[in-house]
Image (tube, grey):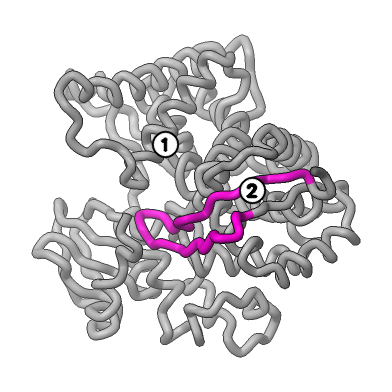
Amino acid sequence: MDPDVLRDLRGPSAAAGGVFWQTERQLMVFDADAAAQANTDNYADLTLPDRLRDLLLRRPSTPVSWKRVRSAWMTQLRTLGGEAGLAALDARMDSLLRARTGVPVNLPWLAHEVSFRSLLPIVLDGLSPSDSAKITEDAIAKLARLLGEAVEDPPWWRSWRPLSIQVKAGLVVRRALRRRSRDPRADLTQPIAELLGELGMDRAVDAVTAVLTAIAGPPGAAEGCVMYELVTRPDWADRLAAEFASVSTAELYGSGTRCAPVAHRFVKEVLRRWTSPTMLTRSVRTPMCVAGHDLAVGQHFVLSPAMVHQDPRHWPDPEVFDPDRWLPGASHGPAGGQHYVPFGWAPTACVGAGLGLCQLVLLCRLLCTTYRIELPASAAPVMAIGPVPMAVGFDGVVRVAGGY
């Protein structure tokens, strides 16, 4: 993996004020204000694409606004992110970490496993072990491609396998959607099942699989970065441990991040310093102008939350990891809300942002109180900036705190 995919883009970006052409058809939009405006303009019309069946019959589908789908998800997330939901999420992470104690593991991959498996019931609950395995296999395949660990040009006799995995996962989602009329569940699939008549099965499956894809990458990358910073900055780990010692789990589940301000600042700084995904490529959906550059339908523009978070025009000492920059009135804190976008830009920002923050704070609590990570004496992990940030040479053993 390239240790820094942004290396060759920083110079041109600084010289052009954050907006420049990389190719004739691809505009890099790394300025915070221009990125926010580009995303707003491109997604002003959030109507879902036509159903596959209607496309084949060459007729328009009943329009469905993506905002309606997002609104249904947001309503459901208020329940899933409540006290009982956070307690269940914490218990799943605890169980997954405990199952991996005492044996050498690659910590970034452990972070992805803990993240995805703990979030899966929030997206698609009630799966059998067999169906859960199919969904997980698809997530692992997508993550391997994202991290560049999959074979790019497999021989012909193996090229069918990724498609087969994806088809099997799609069939699992279809069956789950069909069951929901008689077996409703409190997850993010349920609101889609209730819109099935308007969406049609293919658009409904796409909506659910989009969320499954979303939880297979960035959340796990963020958890891996949290692990890295806790291990390499024991002073901050001690500060978090002291804070968690004075806060009960009931208080944490009930208030989210409000009763753990130090951990909240720590997590926010992890997400600023090591933002995932590194870049987002967007197809131009409507003619528009970005910072004086005209874009036509069919061209592309690239956004980078990582570049926004490292822009020295708005972040003093951007390469310094310092959670105290999030203290009220800190001179090196954010210049404005548009300069901190770890969950993307409106109107397509991540619907699970609040839950994601809570999950990372809960992980901090587990790693600062219940478990500890031990690295070999010769370990020297470093962060690499690829499609997602990931610590390289970051292998170790998770142990129960106080255990042997």
Q: Does the magenta stretch include residue 394?
A: yes
Indicate left or right for 255 with 310 as reference: right
**Badge 1: residue crowd in 10 Å (few <14, some 14–19, many ≥20):** few
* Amino acid type at mark 2: Leu
Residue tagged 1: 210
Mark sitting on residue 171: none
Q: Would residue 263 be visible to someone looking at this image?
A: yes
- What residue sits right under mark 2 in the picture? 355
Q: Relative to residue 141, is residue 58 drawn left or right?
A: left
Instruction: Specify whether 241 is left or right of 81.
Output: right
Q: Earlier in the sequence, mark 2 or mark 1?
A: 1
Residue furthest to the front: 378
**Residue 161 point in image, percent of width and height:** 28, 21
Q: What stretch is highlighted in magenta?
A: 375-400
Q: In this view, does 20 lie above or below 59?
A: below
x and y percentages locating residue 13 in the rendered image = 27, 78
Residue type, mark 1 in image? Ala
